[in-house]
Structure formats: structure tokens, C-alpha cells
Image (cartoon, coloured by chain):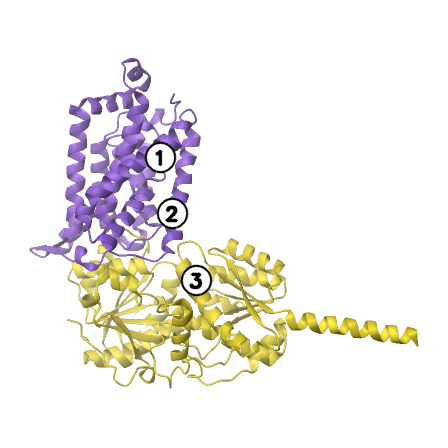
Chain colours: A purple, B yellow
Amino acid sequence: MEIFFNILLSGILLGGIYSLVSIGLNLIFGVVRIVNFAQGELVMLAMYATFFCFAKFGIGPYYAVFLVAPLMFVVGLAIQRIVLQPLQSEPMMQIFATFGLLILFENSVLAITRGEGYSLAGTYSRAVIDIFGLKASVSRLIVFLAATAIAIALTLFLQRTMAGKAIRAVIQDRHSARLMGINVSRTYLLTFALGSALAGVAGALLAPIYTLSPYIGGNFILAAFAVVVLGGLGSVPGAYVGGLAVGLMEAFAGYYVDPALKQAIWFIIFVVVLVLRPSGLMGQVGAEEVGLREQN
Amino acid sequence: MTYRAGLLGAALGISMLATGALAQEPIRIGAINPYSGPVALYGDEVARGYQLAIDEANAKGGVIGRKVELLRGDASNPQQGIAAVEKLVSDKADIFVGTYISAVSNAASDAAMRYSKLYWDTNALAADLTERGLPNFVRSGPYAANFAEVSANATRELLAPALGKPVKGLKVWIESEDSIYGTSIAKRQKELLEKDGATVVGIGAHNFRANDLTDSVLRAKAAAPDVWINTGYVPDGNLLLRTMRDQGFAPQAVLLVGTGDTFETLDALGAEYLQGITVVGYPRPDQTESYGPGAATYLAAYKKKYERDPIAPQGMTAYVGVKILLEAIAAAGSVEVEKIRAAAAKMDKPTKSYATGFGVKFDDKFQNTRAVPTVVQWQSGKIVTVYPKEAAQPDVKLVNLPRK
């Protein structure tokens, strides 16, 4: 029974990682209607930025997050303004552009690091909480708590603030939103930057857990796409719940079926959800159909 | 008379031109490796090994009267391997050497075959490379089966005695990444360990890009092995060890195969946790001079040229590989495939002839049968060669086994 609860816990903590990475991706998808292939690489860049803060200035990852997230916010602003906005009327080109960014970021980091696998020196990933034989690494627990806090804060932001309401209006119908006086371009800019900042938070908090490699973004992003489809396109609570669900399924499949097969689970989820409920668990029904409609 | 003198003069002129050209034309060795991409670090390291062997030969006046030159062909996948060979053929490469990525080696050696060029493999591990029987292929370094053999031998001769247990009945868990690289080694380890009487309590395979390996660790933990063996890459190896620590899974002995002996693992786990963990890997320059004559010279040359310690031990195996190649060329007096292979087939040097402790004796498939990995142990954040016994420095002792 202890094993069962340990698997349950590891699934929830893994789910926290997926939620954290997926929320930003889903926000960008819901609002800007771009499948941002470079989202995983934004997480990767943030991980390296965190490592840099630690290695050069001795700033630990849980402080560095307050530098890295704003930095990634600015990076997001720049990407949206310089790369994506000029392609606004060509949604397919925007997707290719994010794919181009993926390659650019990966190879730039590769060129700088020569592929050396960096790690934040042991100290930050060492602490473990043990409750009646259930073991949870503190660094993963922090990721889970951060994902939960961000999901709540973001939901409140979208529900309660004017900027949040503007974002929701754009999600529902950008043309009407514009008629109501909402600056749609600025909303895109803000959303993409916010999504990038969330990638920044994810990167900083994941840096103590993994060995950094230029390709690590890809490990998360495949799972994140399954999460987004399961949770519902554009839905913040959907991304959170979807992340937990995917984490749990992966953990249980890994232990009780076969660790080598667990990644197949992502794609089984992907296909089953797309066939049975294309809008996902919490997405707005019909939202998936407007995925690539004209955007000007 | 004028006619004859003219003819003589012309002939003399041509022959002088010819010898002049020969004297200047270097032997060009095309080195196929990833020099960009996620695995470029080790590609560069392997090429550094080649370069040091070539520098050494050139300092002695070259080989068969010609200087040796290294050309680089960047390849991290099979398609690039083929393209790199074609590019280097147009750059007049005479011979190809490469790489530690088996899939690239496979494709590049095929491509070299089409141009009737020798492909001399120094670092790839897949068994099928030599088993194909390709007529231009030679492998000077150890391959997957050697790593499996050394892990079984070390379990019997090193770990079991250190744990104070007979190998018969010793409980072993064999973990590996789930591609052909890891699973083929794991399969062979199982055969050999069971032959020795060890009890293989479980075999686990995991994806090396997995985001979480708690499942793999809990499975092994439930089987309570004495020895836990893992064959994989750096990221998954680090994640497994971290998860083992988090989950309180502490087998008495840990044996890593292939990776786990670089600063990348030290940075991730810290010296304290790694204390006592053993690794089957490429021979390292710290072994005794009697086991690896020239290892210290290699280390000094490396430090002088690159102003740092070697990044990974693959470089020394690459260095020895090219040394053997150059000896074969000297014996053949030629850079042609058949002549070098014929000369290589005649080579017979006992083990402990080179810096890596290798000897030379090729089998009929041109696999060097006298190239074996060694076992090292993490001791206070440093890597120390511990097996075979004659490779270990006399003052070296095993530490923290059984692991606490």
C-alpha cells in the first residue's frame, strides 16, 4: 500500500511539473491562437538563465525566479512584437515562425554550451520530506505548490481584473472585442509575454530538478500538448487539472505497466480526447474549431 | 642526342615533380563526429584524441614519409554521416575515422565503402558494426559486449568481495535505457551474471528522456537488490540517482555503465552521494604506467594543447585508436583499404601495450579483441581507476562499499 501512495504522490508531483509548463502554453493558445512550439525552449532558456544566476552570482533558483520571470516576460514581448505581430494575418506562418524560434534557441544554447550537461550543484535538490514512508522531494513540492498558486492567481486575474476581462473577451470573439474598444494587439502582446513569464517561472523552478540540456524543452512540451488537449484549449483550470491527470496516468502506467511504455500514454490521451471530446475537459465547446481562423 | 637529352630532361623533370608532390601531399584523415548538436561535446573530445595522436606522429616526421592531417566532418545522424563522407572525399580524404555514435558510424562507413576508403572506427559500441562484415571496416576500441563482460567480471571480482558476499546468490537489478544500446548490454549482462550464479531480481528499461523515473526506482527498490547496475546516458542516469536518493533506495553497490564518470554527474549529485559508486567506462589517464604505458604522456600532451583536464575519457581511446591506425599504415606502406586491413590483421600486440591498456589482435571481423573498458570509482569527488587490479595505482583502495 505504501508503494501505491508513493506512486500517487510522485504522479501528483509530476503532474505539478506538467501543469506549470502547460498553463503558459495554453494561455497563449487560447488568446493569441498560436500553437507556440517554442514554449518548451522558453522553459529551457529560463533554466539556463537560472543556472547562470547561480553559477555567476551565487543567486539560488528560488530567488532567481524573480529575475528570470521578468526577463522572460521581456523576451516574450520581443517575440510577439518583432516576430509574430508582423505575421498576424498569416497564422500558418506564425506557427512556422515559432518552430523557427525553437530551432534557433536550441542551437544557440548548444553553440554556447557545446552540449555540456549542467546541473545546479546538489544543494537545491537534496531535501526530502518523509511522511509515514511517503517521500517527496522538496524541489518538486515547490513546483507543485507554485503551479497551484499560479493557476488560482491567473484564474482570479482573468475573472476579476479589467485586463483579465479583456483577455477573456478576446478569447471569445476578437472582432467584437475590438468593437468594444479593446486593444487586441496589446492584449496579444500582454498574453504572449505573460505566457513567456510563466515559462520563466517553470524554468527557474525546474532547474534544480533536472540536468540541463539544450533539448530538454522537448521533453516537457510533448506532455504539455497532451495536457492542453485534455484540459481544454485556452482554459487555465483545464491546464492545471489536465497536468495532474497526465502526471498521474504516467506514474501509474510506469509502475504497473512498464516504464518504457509510459510516454505512449500521452498520445493515447491525445487521440482519445480528440475523438471523444475535442474541446477537452474544461475547454469551451466549439473553441477548438476556431483554432486557426483569420486573426486580423 | 638533342632528342635523347630532351627526353631525359623531361623524364627527370616529371619524376622530380612527382616526388615533390608526393613529399608534400599529406595523409588526410577525415574524422566523422558530431561537432555541433547535443552530443558535440564528446565529438570534440574524440577529435582532440585524434589530433594528439596525429601531432605525435608528425613530430616524428610523419608516416610513410608523409605528414598527417585531420579533416573534420560534422555528423550527428546517419544522413549527415553520409554527407560528411562525400564532402571529405571531395576534400581528398584518404581514410575515415569516427565516431562514438553507432548509427553514424554505420552509415558513414557504408558511404566510405562506395569510395573504396577505409573506415577505422575508434569509439562506437554497437555489435552489428563489425558483424556486418563490411570490407572497409575496422574497430580498434571496445564494443558493447566488452562493457557487459567487464560489468559482470567487476561484479564477481570487485563488488561481491567488497560486500563480503559470494557472487552465487548475489541479488542484482539490471536497469538500462530502452533503446538497442542499453537493452543489448542489459541482455548480455543478465546472461553473464546468471552464468556466474548471481540472482537477477529484475530488469528495468526506461526512456532516457523521461521526465520522471520514480516508477523505475520504486520497482527496483521493491526487489531489494544488493547491486544495482544501470546502462544509460547522462540525463537519465543523473535523474535515476537523484530519485534513488529521494526515495531512500540505497543498494549496497551501484555500478553505472558507459556514463556517470564526468563532472556532469558530479555537479548533479555532489561528491558525498557519489562516494563509492563504480562506473564501467573507457580507460582513464590515472591508471598505472605498467597497465597503460603512455597514459601520463597523453595527459600531459592534452593539458598542454587544450589547457584543461580531459572532458571525458573517450578522447584517450580515440587517441589510441588513431595510433594503432597509423602503425597499420606504416606497416602497409600505403593508405589503400586492402593493404591496411592486411597489415592490421597481422598486428599482434599484447594487452597493456597502449595508454588505454589495450593490445591489438583483430578477429576475422576486424574487431580488436584486446580492447577492454576499465572500472572506476568515485572517491571524494574524484574518479579513481580501481579495476582491473593492475590498472589501479598501488595505493588505491575501494571506499564506501557496502555503500552507507
Q: Which mark is residue B180?
A: none
Whether the residues at callouts 1 and 2 have beta carbons within 8 Å, the answer is: no
Badge 3 local density, few (<14 within 10 Å), some, or many (20+)?
some
Q: What residue did someone put label 3 on?
A: B44
Q: Quadrant of the C terminus of chain B?
A: bottom left
Measure the C-alpha gap from mark 2 to mark 3: 19 Å
Tag 3: amino acid: Asp
Measure the C-alpha gap from mark 1 to mark 3: 33 Å
Measure the C-alpha gap from mark 1 to mark 2: 16 Å
Q: Chain of mark 2?
A: A
Q: Which mark is residue A79?
A: 1
Badge 1 local density, few (<14 within 10 Å), some, or many (20+)?
some
Left or right position of B223 against B190? left
Percent across and percent down for residue B275 are 21, 70
Task: Name above or below for residue B274 compared with residue A161.
Answer: below
Task: Name above or below for residue A253 compared with residue B166.
Answer: above
Residue at the (35%, 50%) spot, across then down: A214
Q: Secondary structure at mark 1?
A: helix
Tag 2: amino acid: Glu
Whether the residues at callouts 1 and 3 have beta carbons within 8 Å, the answer is: no
Q: What residue did someone put label 2 on?
A: A106
Q: Chain of mark 3?
A: B
